[in-house]
Image: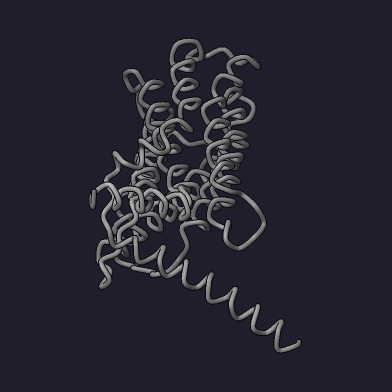
Amino acid sequence: MSSTERSLCSSRLEKVSSKSFEQFSLLRYRLAPADVFKSVGPKLVPFFKAFCIYFVAGQSENSNIFHAAIKILPIICLCGFVLLQGVTFERYHDYSRRIFIGLILSAIGDICLVWKKQFFIHGMLAFALAHLSYMRAFGFQPLKPLTGIICFLITVPFYHVYFPNLKGLLIVAVPIYIVIISIMVWRAVTGLQAQLWSDEGLWRWTKLCSCLGAVTFGISDMIIGLHMFCFPVPYAQIFIMSTYYAGQLGIALSTFSLDDEYHLRMKHIVLKKD
């Protein structure tokens, strides 16, 4: 490599590192969730429309293609939102790509559960894989085992409640699923903890979204288990699907790109100075 080429590479690296430093430095400024929702709101209009369509026309127990299409429509809209944040095979997009894969797997699980008498186990498998993809996105650093123990202590006892009514493969599948979703919630909560207790005091609202989304998703699964294996939950479908969509929305919102957040913070800081 010639000296000219070396100087060009060095110049590019300096620009990239300078921009990265500037971006992460701006994270020190607090950004109100309302400011972010004003920015992402237009991109979420299709999701909220699909959400309303489901609760108006899709809440039936009929196992047909129309019901399946209406049910997955909000998730497909969230897939579109994540795609707008950037989904490639580059390392920079690892997080959004894994969330996107989780949403696709969730849509497959939704379709299976429309025909739950035949494909309930298949739906559980699809959602378990979705949780694994989310778990991989959230990462395992820092570990914070105490948080994991607390998550397990909250969720695992539900198996004891479900067990008397479990039969066949469900006796094994349900506890495995509970452990997987417990780990997913643990990793999401840990991500938020790492920022709240960081010595640098940095704050990214996206960590809050992923944490709330994971916890809400867990609540949705808990209601499904109680309704299916324990006792009829009043207005079960409304509670299950509203918490499910809210959970997926929170997880999808956590893909809000650093570049978009950077520009939004710059605009916010300029307005404050003016």
Say whether residue 232 is left or right of residue 178: left
Query: Residue extending furthest right?
Result: 1
Tell me where residue 183 sits by quadrant. Answer: bottom left
Q: Is residue 169 visible?
A: no
The N terminus lies in which quarter of the figure? bottom right
State how the image is colored: one colour
The x, y position of residue 96, in whole percent, is 54, 51
* Residue at x 45%, y 30% (from the top left corner): 42
**Toward the viewer: 4 or 256?**
4
In the depicted structure, whether residue 114 falls above or below residue 244: above
Say whether residue 254 is left or right of residue 108: left
Say whether residue 236 is left or right of residue 171: left
Say whether residue 151 is left or right of residue 61: left
**Toward the viewer: 102 or 175?**
102
The x, y position of residue 197, in whole percent, is 25, 66
The x, y position of residue 108, in whole percent, is 62, 34
* Residue at x 62%, y 14% (from the top left corner): 66
Count up the numbered dots. Answer: 0
Tell me where residue 239 sits by quadrant. Answer: top left
**Toward the viewer: 221 or 13?**
13
**Toward the viewer: 185 or 202?**
202
Tell me where residue 225 sits by quadrant. Answer: top left
* Residue at x 48%, y 54% (from the top left corner): 259
Q: Is residue 173 visible?
A: yes
